[in-house]
Image (tube, rainbow, N blue to C red):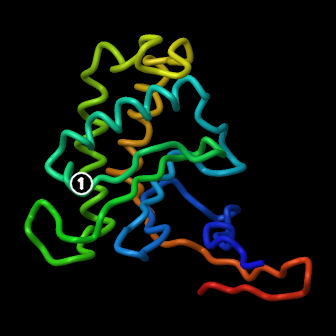
Amino acid sequence: MEVIQSFTIDHTHLKPGIYVSREDKGFTTFDLRITEPNKEPAVAPAAMHSLEHLMATWFRNSEAKDDVVYVGPMGCLTGMYIIMKDHGSAEGRPSGSYTVEDMRRLTIECLEWILTQDKVPATEPQTCGNYLLHDLPMCKWESRRYLDRLQHDFHCEYTKLQVTLDDGMVFADA
């Protein structure tokens, strides 16, 4: 069995930032890493849920809305994934043109907007599968901290690993 590409990232050296996780099949997956894995606490589930609602709302109403495919949390609760279509951006550039810098700018704008919000959208039983699991104050705290990191201590290059599977096969992604 092949190793999933994201499992080849050395999480012991991964810093908060924005990374290109995948570029294939006409899509770019961005890894918006909010906390430092295994060294800092993960984002609390209620705060992450609120962040998901707010980021999804902002991105799907932004200048890039026609290219947004998915905005959602990582299972480890250390960041968010944003998947973008690669058939041109809001600036009219050619296919595959969403760069880490584009996503950094968009994410900074999104986080600044989140900090102005007084409520989380779609938090009623009719609009959310777990409407009681939200924490706007903690979401804002995480957003403020991530915003500061994106502005002052930006990281965007993965450290890769070589992985040996149980059957002895070696998978390396450098």
Residue 112, given in percent of the width and then of the height, sits at: 26, 35
| Residue for point 72% across, 79% down | 2
71 is higher (above) or lower (below) than 51: below
Identity, as a three-letter code, of the amino acid under mark 1: Arg
| Residue for point 85% across, 79% down | 165
Q: Residue furthest right?
A: 167
What residue would you read off at disc 1?
105
| Residue for point 42% across, 59% down | 18
Which of 149 and 100 lies nearest the eye of the viewer? 100
Residue 27, given in percent of the width and then of the height, sits at: 37, 68
Q: Quadrant of residue 55?
A: top left
Residue 93, given in percent of the width and then of the height, sits at: 12, 73
Instruction: Identify the element where label 1 is drawn.
Output: helix
107 is higher (above) or lower (below) than 41: below
Number of marks present in the image shown = 1
Indicate the quadrant containing the C terminus: top left, top right, bottom left or bottom right. Answer: bottom right
| Residue for point 64% across, 45% down | 75
Indicate the quadrant containing the N terminus: top left, top right, bottom left or bottom right. Answer: bottom right
Left or right relative to 74: residue 90: left
Neighbours of disc 1 within 10 Å: few (<14), some (14-19), many (20+)? few
Left or right relative to 154: residue 7: right
Which of 48 and 108 lies nearest the eye of the viewer? 48
85 is higher (above) or lower (below) than 141: below
Residue 49, given in percent of the width and then of the height, sits at: 51, 29
Left or right relative to 95: residue 168: right
